[in-house]
Image (tube, rainbow, N blue to C red):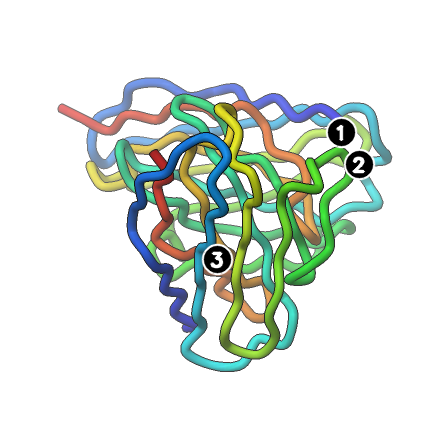
Amino acid sequence: VHLEESGGGLVQPGGSLRLSCAASGFTFSYYEMNWVRQAPGKGLEWISYIKSSGDAQYYADSVRGRFTISRDNAKNELYLQMTSLRVEDTAVYYCVRDPIFDSWGQGALVTVSS
Amino acid sequence: DIQMTQSPPSLSASVGDRVTITCRANQGIKNYLAWFQQRPGKAPKSLIYAASTLQSGVSSRFSGSGYGTDFTLTIISLQPEDFATYYCHQYYDYPFTFGPGTEVD
């Protein structure tokens, strides 16, 4: 099982960014997926979930309405579209396989700063 | 939202020690509880799920117990690679939540 995030970087407050997570080593379309983030020096925060078929999503209150999770099962990829970014969204973002969070990517750093 | 607490926030231990970390949920979560280990600069690693089931490939030095609201993670005979931060996590209901972490140093 391998998960690899990409798309992180520096963005100004109010800006947008899209993270991708490439999955390999398992049948991606069978699994539900999540995004979890970790602000510098802080703990873990779950932010979003998507059903294996892509037709159901859940979000943490902190990102609902600003972030959108999606997936392309044909490409074995998971996405997180982030808009209206805030300084407090600065974190390492991990894609994580459900249901028991057994596999994590290495993380993508998103820095929101002017 | 389900709130998770952990104690202690940190602990000092030595190689060979037995370490116990507790995790409490503010409402019942049955056994929908997982434990993760995170070393500095690394992604979290799954240790235990369903409160007491050891993840494949994880050392039997680790064990978990509990049901409902109170859970424990025990590490017997602490090894150098076990010095890390440990998080509990409930996946009983959305939004999923994590405990604040326990640093073992």
Circle 2 — which element?
helix
Residue B44, image x, y percentages: 52, 35
Amino acid type of the residue that numbered disc 2 sits on in the rendered structure: Phe
Residue at the image position 64 percent from the left and 52 percent from the top:
B63
**Residue A25 drawn above or below residue A33:** above
Amino acid type of the residue that numbered disc 3 sits on in the rendered structure: Tyr
Q: Name the residue under label 3.
A: A59
Residue A21, image x, y percentages: 61, 27
Q: Name the residue under label 1.
A: A76
Residue at the image position 69 percent from the left and 30 percent from the top:
A77
Q: Nearer the viewer, residue B72 or A111?
A: B72
**Residues tagged 2 and 1 counted as in contact (Cβ below 8 A):** yes
Residue at the image position 58 percent from the left and 35 percent from the top:
B45
**Residues tagged 3 and 1 counted as in contact (Cβ below 8 A):** no
In screen coordinates, is B21 left or right of B50?
left
Q: Which of B39 and B97 is in front in this view?
A: B39
Q: Which chain carries label 3?
A: A
Residue at the image position 29 percent from the left and 46 percent from the top:
B10
